Amino acid sequence: MKKGLLIFGIIILAILFGLALVKGLSGEDDWLCQNGQWVKHGKPSSSAPTTGCGIAKKLVKPEIKIDAPSIDEKISSPFNISGEAIGNWYFEASFPIQLVDESGKILVQTNGQANGDWMTTDFVPFTSQLIFNPGEAKSGKIIFKNDNPSGNSESQKIYELSVTF
């Protein structure tokens, strides 16, 4: 009888341990990548990841610094962009930039052009000019992408800056 009770207790403990393990691995309290954004799931004990998620990594500015425009600045054509990006954002001294309206329609595609030696791990200044017609659009965003000649989606990095017209 005592042996049966002991086995029953061990089985119950094993089930409880298994449930605790499954709950811990299920990401109940974790950050989930949804549509390229980090979303809280439960009450994670850590802050949101700073690495990108999804196909392209959306950055929180450590690899690119934008001097102009500022966030939500009202811009008109022509508009000069300036900033700095780390050397590996460039390929042949440039990287792609797009201006899209609020519906995602591309208004213009251009390049950020390095103003110095881009073959470095340091920040390199860049400039670009946007010549565009916003049509009826009231807002949009400038999308900065590292030049990714490999085409490897895991190497793609993106920084987006909202603007108004």
Image (cartoon, rainbow, N blue to C red):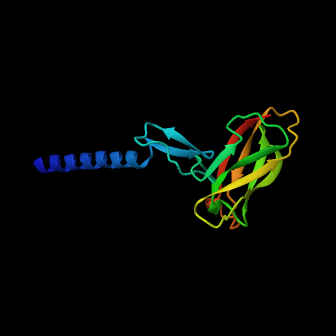
Q: Is residue 151 above or below residue 19?
A: below
Residue 58 vs residue 12: left or right?
A: right
The residue furthest left is: 2
Query: Residue at horizontal 83%, vertical 34%?
Result: 137
Task: Give x and y (percent) for residue 124.
Answer: 65, 58
Q: Is residue 43 above or below residue 6?
A: above
Residue 75 vs residue 34: left or right?
A: right
* Residue 1 visible (yes or no): no
Q: Quadrant of residue 145?
A: bottom right
Count the marks. Answer: 0
Task: Give x and y (percent) for residue 9.
Answer: 20, 46
Q: Quadrant of residue 44?
A: top left
Judge by depth and name the residue closer to the eye, 57 or 28. Answer: 57
Q: Quadrant of the C terminus?
A: top right
Query: Residue at horizontal 61%, vertical 65%?
Result: 120
Q: Is residue 20 above or below residue 153?
A: above
The residue furthest front is: 116
Query: Residue at horizontal 70%, vertical 38%?
Result: 162
Task: Give x and y (percent) for residue 113.
Answer: 75, 58
Task: Give x and y (percent) for residue 111.
Answer: 77, 56
Query: Residue at horizontal 40%, vertical 41%?
Result: 45
* Residue 16 visible (yes or no): yes
